[in-house]
């Protein structure tokens, strides 16, 4: 059985492409899982797998005084910018 319960590789590829579209933005699971077309449990499992593999980093908000934190959501970043750029290639190009 594949890692992180990935049984439908094309759906997983779409999920990773949707992650890439949110690179550097605030992370919210709801819109992500809806756009990828997967259940919330599946999205969490796949996200945890990608984070554990080191492909994505969730940067937690930081402020000395937690009450003054303007942004209270994590930001999502790909750790491999070359991979993120490869994901943004148009379909049909040399992938």
Image (cartoon, rainbow, N blue to C red):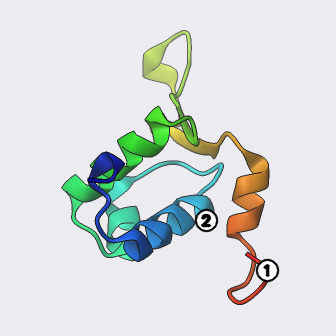
The reply, left or right, for residue 65 in relation to residue 20 is: left
Q: Where in the figure is residue 9, as x and y percent of width and height?
A: 40, 69
Label 1 vs 2, first from the N-terminus: 2
The reply, left or right, for residue 36 in relation to residue 90 is: left
Residue that numbered label 1 is attached to: 94
Q: Secondary structure at mark 2?
A: helix
Q: Where in the figure is residue 10, as x and y percent of width and height?
A: 43, 76
**In 3D space, how far apart are the residues under numbered discs 1 and 2 (Cα atoms)?**
20 Å
Residue placed farthest to the front in the image?
1
Q: Looking at the image, do the residues carrying marks 1 and 2 touch, with CB atoms under 8 Å apart?
A: no
Q: Residue at x 71, y 90 (%)?
A: 92
Give the label on residue 21, or none. Answer: 2
Q: Where in the figure is residue 47, as x and y percent of width and height?
A: 40, 47
Location of residue 48 with respect to 43 vertically, above or below: above
Quadrant for residue 80, please give it.
Answer: top right
Q: Where in the figure is residue 14, as x and y percent of width and height?
A: 47, 73
Q: Residue at x 32, y 47 (%)?
A: 4
């Amino acid at each position: 059985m594949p890692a992180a319960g990935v049984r439908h590789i094309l759906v997983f590829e779409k999920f990773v492409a949707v992650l890439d579209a949110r690179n550097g933005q605030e992370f919210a699971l709801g819109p992500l899982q809806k756009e990828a077309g997967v259940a919330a449990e599946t999205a969490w499992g796949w996200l945890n797998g990608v984070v554990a593999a080191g492909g994505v980093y969730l940067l937690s908000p930081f402020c000395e005084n937690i009450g003054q934190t303007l942004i209270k959501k994590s930001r999502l970043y790909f750790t491999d910018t070359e991979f993120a750029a490869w994901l943004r290639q148009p379909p049909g190009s040399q992938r």
